[in-house]
Image (cartoon, rainbow, N blue to C red):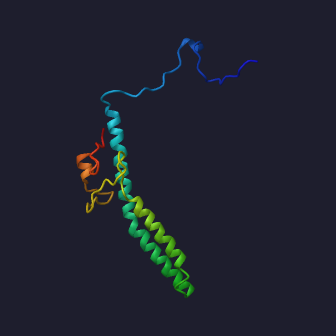
Amino acid sequence: METVRHPLAWRKTDRGGLPPLAPQPQIGFNPRAMVEKWEQVRRELQRARGARRLVPWAFLSALLGWAFLAVAARNWRAGIPLLAGGLLFTLVIRVLAVPHCPSCGKNLWIRGERPGPPTAPVPTQAERDRRCPRCGAGLDA
């Protein structure tokens, strides 16, 4: 019985060439990897800044939804499930508004640091030093 091969599978005899080699890890200095790692950290910081901006909006939406439903139903208890869901949503956003170090997984912002909005960010210590303030790991190498 003859085995069936995929038509795109390489053989040593096909077209006289060898199969392509699997990419090997580079040893030594790799500037592209540095840019890619810092880009990943920068995106994490921007994501956290954007999530931080949504917290007040989500909280006010939960309160206003509860208030409108309570007025419409003429009963303050009618909007409690909507309020609970909105507050839970606010809590999830608040938890996601923390950027994490790729090495240790801890917070990249120091307590009391004001990173600013995504449109006009204020550089944090992690961005200035390009190091994690908790574990000291380099964020660009």
Q: Residue at x 42, y 72 (%)?
A: 59
The reply, left or right, for residue 87 in relation to residue 103 is right
Q: Residue at x 35, y 41 (%)?
A: 37
Instruction: Find residue 77 and report its image quarter.
Output: bottom right
Q: How many marks?
A: 0
In the image, 98 versus 68, the foreground residue is 98
Instruction: Find residue 54 and report its image quarter.
Output: bottom left
- Please provide percent x and percent y for residue 75: 55, 87
Extreme residue toward the bottom, this view: 74
- Please provide percent x and percent y for residue 133: 26, 51
- Please provide percent x and percent y for residue 94: 40, 63
Extreme residue toward the right, this view: 1
Q: Residue at x 61, y 23 (%)?
A: 9
Q: Quadrant of the C terminus?
A: top left
- Please provide percent x and percent y for residue 128: 23, 49
Q: Quadrant of the N terminus?
A: top right
Q: Residue at x 41, y 61 (%)?
A: 95
Q: Is residue 140 above or below residue 51?
A: above
The reply, left or right, for residue 49 in relation to residue 83 is left
Q: Is residue 107 above or below residue 25?
A: below
